[in-house]
Image (cartoon, rainbow, N blue to C red):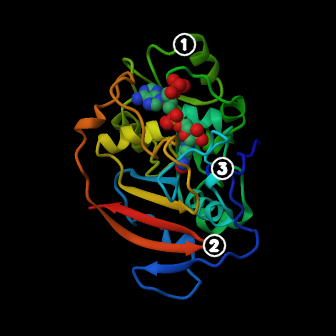
Amino acid sequence: MVTMSSTHTGGADATAAPIAFRELLPSPGGADADPAAAYAYPGDLDRPWVRANMVASADGGAIGPSGRSRDLSSAPDRRVMGALRALCDVVLVGAATARVEGYGPVRVRRAWEGLRAGRPRTPAVAVVSRSLDLPEALVTEAPADARTLVFTTSDSPAQRRRAIAEHADVVVVEGVSVTPAHVVNGLAERGLYRVLTEGGPHLLAEFVAAGLLDELCLTLSPHLLGSGAPRIVAGGPDTPGAPDQASAQSTPVRMAHLLEAQGSLFARYVRE
Ligand SMILES: NC(=O)c1ccc[n+]([C@@H]2O[C@H](COP(=O)([O-])OP(=O)(O)OC[C@H]3O[C@@H](n4cnc5c(N)ncnc54)[C@H](OP(=O)(O)O)[C@@H]3O)[C@@H](O)[C@H]2O)c1
C-alpha cells in the first residue's frame, strides 16, 4: 500500500516522539492536550459532518514554493493530521490535491486501533474529479473494507471510468459538476458521516459556498509566503459549475479550541 508523502496531506506518525500540545483556548492549560480528544467529532451524528483540515502561513498562504503544502507542515501538524484521520470515516479530496500530493490509500497505523474500534482499520479516501486522472495506487491499492470512492461527472472519460470502476466505487453525477450536495448525499448513503476534507482550496471553496462545511481545522504555520501564494480557498465562476464566490455569504464560526505546539497554532472553528 502506498503511503502519502509526508506533507500536510501526508501520513502522520502517531507513534513518534511525544509532542507537547498546549491548550490556549477555551481554557489555558498545561502542555498535555490530547489531539484525539480535542478533535473528537460530535456524538450521535445523523448526517455527514464535514470537517476540513488545512494549513496556512502566518500571512495566509496555502501553497509553498514547492507547489505543495509541505513547506508549511511540521511534526505537530502531522500529528494533528494523524489524529484527524484516525477519527474520520472518510478522507475527501479534490483530484488536483490527490495528484500533486501523490495520494494513495491511507496507511494503517497501530496507534489508531483504539480510535477505530468497530470500523475499518483505515478511513476510505473519496476523490472528486472530472478528468479521472488519478494516482493509480489510490484507485487500485485500497483495502476491500475501505475502497476508494470516486465522484465524477457523466461527461468524464468513459473508458477511464470503466477501468476505475473495476477497483473503486464510482459515483457518476449527471452534468458537468459534482456539487458538494452530491458528495454529502453519496457519503450519507454509505454511512460515512465523519468526513475529513483535506482540500484543496478549490474543492474547499465549493463546500464553503454551498454552506456545507461544518468545521475548519486550521493550522497556522510560522512562515511568511508573500502575496503570490493562494489562500486555503480558491476558485470562482470560471470553474465549470462552481458557485460565484463573490456572492458567497459571510458565515459566522465559533472557535472551539486553540492549541499550540512548536510555534504552530491549531484552531478549530465550528459553524454556528
Ligand atoms: N494548504 C493546505 O492545507 C492544502 C491542502 C490541500 C491541498 N493544498 C494544495 O492545493 C493544491 C491543489 O488544490 P486545488 O485547489 O488546485 O485543487 P483541488 O481542490 O484539490 O482539486 C480540484 C480538482 O478537483 C476536481 N473537482 C473540483 N470540483 C469539482 C466539481 N465540482 N466537479 C467535478 N470535479 C471537481 C477537478 O478534478 P480534475 O482536474 O481531475 O477534473 C478539479 O480540477 C496543491 O498545490 C496542494 O498542495 C494545500
Judging depth in this view, the residue of 100 and 12 nearest the camera is 100
Q: What residue is rendered at 69% in x and 53% in y?
A: 11
Q: Which residue is mark 2?
A: 262
Q: Residue at x 64, y 64 (%)?
A: 79
Q: Position of residue 151 (x, y in %)?
A: 48, 30
State the quadrant of the C terminus: bottom left
- Residue 191 picture location, percent across and down: 45, 47
Q: Secondary structure at mark 2?
A: loop
Rendering coords of residue 245 (x, y %): 30, 36
Q: Picture coordinates of residue 15 (x, y %)?
A: 74, 68
Q: Amino acid at mark 2?
A: Gln
The amino acid sitting under disc 3 is Arg
Crowding near the residue tagged with mark 3, few <14, some 14–19, many ≥20 C-alpha atoms within 10 Å? many
Q: Is mark 3 within 8 Å of ligand 1?
A: yes
Sort mark 2 into few (<14), some (14-19) or many (20+) by Cα contacts within 10 Å.
Answer: some
Q: Secondary structure at mark 1?
A: loop
Residue for badge 3:
70
